[in-house]
Amino acid sequence: MQGVFFFFFFFFFFFFCVKFIVTTEQVKRHLLGFNGKNFLYMTHHVLNSALNHCFISIGNTGIPAWRLRTGCRDKTMAFYSSSGHRCLQSLLTWANFVLVCCGIALMAMCIYFIYDHEGVYVLVDATGSESVWRAAWIGLFTGFAFICVPVFGMYAIMKSSKKLIFAYFILMLIVFAFEMASAITAATHKDWFSPNLFLKEMLQYYNKPLPGVVPSNQDEIYKIKGVTAAWNRIMIEKKCCGVNGPQDWVTFDSYFRQQNIDADYPWPRQCCQQDAMGAFSSLDGCKIGLNPYLSNTGCYPYIGDYLRTFGLAVSWFGFSILCWTFLVLLGMMAFYILLDY
């Protein structure tokens, strides 16, 4: 978060420094001192080359510097009021429209993960490391903001209003800071979910006796029921057993081990292979660990891959949007400054 606010401060400070330099009369007089040529007159050749794709030709005006110093705006400076102005407006409008599309995609992606179609949120929540889901909620907010603010920016561009563009800057920088926080959180927390973290949670909550139903125990009851149901569903659907394999239930002490003897339940029955109708292929064969009837693979690859994909998608797509947003802000800054002329 310190990096986010540092960037916010630096960008804001840089914007006002540029604005101050351009609008200071002393600097203007310094720029106009090169053989009596105005700063805009000296750079019109560069602008002419940059805007060739827009079929704009500023031409050689040959205007004396003293006329430009007095603020005379005639047809030779039409770049700022006609073709060039419209080209820059169109370019920035298109760039903001891309931001709107990115905002829609970011919202859709975050909603998909928040919906938790894999049903692993309760496992993540029980570990106390649900920061990735917080990043998704922040991404959902910033996705909506990336829809609204660029639309406002397109309106400000069409109106060529400095006040509206300045308001756009403030809003977009706030959204920029939040999206950076979301991307950094997802990128730094996606690797926290190690096998040992889920193993400890499974042994601690799976099949644990429920405490008394009092308000202070509601969270504990939610975790016990949620973790037990989630592990049962994952082991059946993914045909896996435990975090690393069936030996997790035999090697380590757990509430499941305390309530069941090895001969009857060396591991949960959800580890046993089932047919299409949900019946066990061979319960006796599963109890003694025969390969065709017992799921020998662990469930962590399914949980870990999903969470890593989740974190990478939220973080890197967020960073991509931030890079494009930075370019759009630079373009809007240039447009804001050119409105002075």
Image (cartoon, grey):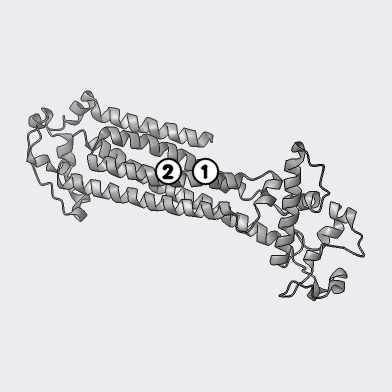
User: In this rendering, is residue 38 above or below 104?
Assistant: above
Label annotation for residue 145: 2
Q: From the viewer's side, name the closer residue of 65 and 105.
A: 105
Q: From the viewer's side, name the closer residue of 63 and 323.
A: 323
Residue 95 in the image: x percent, y percent?
32, 49
Q: Provide the residue designation for mark 1.
A: 138
Q: Residue at x 45, y 36 (%)?
A: 7
**Quadrant of the image occupied by residue 19:** top left
Label 2 crowd bin: few (<14), some (14–19), many (20+), radius 10 Å = many
Which quadrant, please, contains the C terminus?
top left
Q: From the viewer's side, name the closer residue of 23 and 239.
A: 239
Label 2 is placed on what type of residue?
A: Ala
- SS type, badge 1: helix
**Quadrant of the image occupied by residue 116:** bottom right
Residue 2 in the image: x percent, y percent?
53, 34
Label 1 is placed on what type of residue?
A: Ile
Distance from disc 2 to disc 1, alpha carbons, whole Å, reads 11 Å
User: In this rendering, is residue 298 above or below 210?
Assistant: below
Q: Residue at x 27, y 36 (%)?
A: 336
